[in-house]
Amino acid sequence: MISDAIKSIDWAGTAYCLTGHICKVYFREPARKGLEGLHYRVKNHSVIELSPRVVNPDAMLMLFLHECGHARLHFDDLKIHQSEPQPLSRPKHSEGHWQSPKITMREDDAERLARKWYKFCRPQTTLEGKHRVLRSYYDV
Ligand SMILES: [Zn+2]
């Protein structure tokens, strides 16, 4: 179950500030089985799905930032879906998928950016505070 503290935050607003484009953020099981978080492109916006199985607010934030990393770095290269697939409607990726150099590089790049963002907001003690400073990350 997603806590009220998590639900009360404007995650999509933070995602917009970090990625520069519209991101819909859902707390539901991702379309792809076997994952806690997923990012994909529908038309001209991003969809970020975060599993409600993740209960720790900091773990949820890290997962969110990782998916925002994909949204910022890889949006232009992604396949364009016309609609959102149903939760758990896609089979689990094979082991080989995660070992492909292209995927490994993408995962590393998204994680590196997520850690940079996280480091920036970490001094804030509350989840609201972390989101507030994240929204100012790219301000001049
Ligand atoms: Zn990833």
Image (cartoon, rainbow, N blue to C red):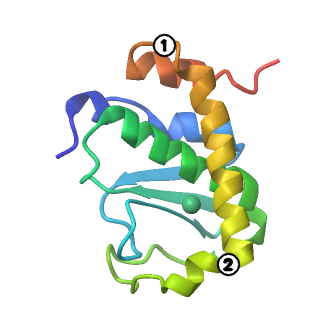
Residue occupying the point 48% across, 13% down: 124
Residue at image x 71%, y 54%? 109
Q: Nearer the viewer, residue 40 or 111?
A: 111
Q: Pointer 1: what residue?
A: 124
For numbered disc 1, what is the local secondary structure?
loop
- The three-letter amino acid code for the residue at tag 1 is Gln
Q: Position of residue 71 (x, y in %)?
A: 65, 55
Q: Residues within 10 Å of mark 1 (few under 14, many from 20)?
A: few
Q: Quadrant of residue 35?
A: bottom left
Residue 88 makes an appearance in the image: yes
Quadrant position of the C terminus in the picture:
top right
Residue 26: numbered disc:
none
Query: Which class describes the residues within 10 Å of circle 2: few (<14), some (14-19), or many (20+)?
Result: few
Q: Quadrant of ligand 1?
A: bottom right
Direction from residue 81 to residue 108 in the image, left or right: right
Three-letter code, disc 2: Lys
Q: Earlier in the sequence, mark 1 or mark 2?
A: 2
| Residue sitting at the far right | 140
Reading the image, the residue beneath label 2 is 79
Residue 134 % position (x, y): 59, 26
In this rendering, which labeled residue sits more in front, label 1 or label 2?
1
Locate residue 70: give its quadrant.
bottom right
Q: Is residue 81 visible?
A: no
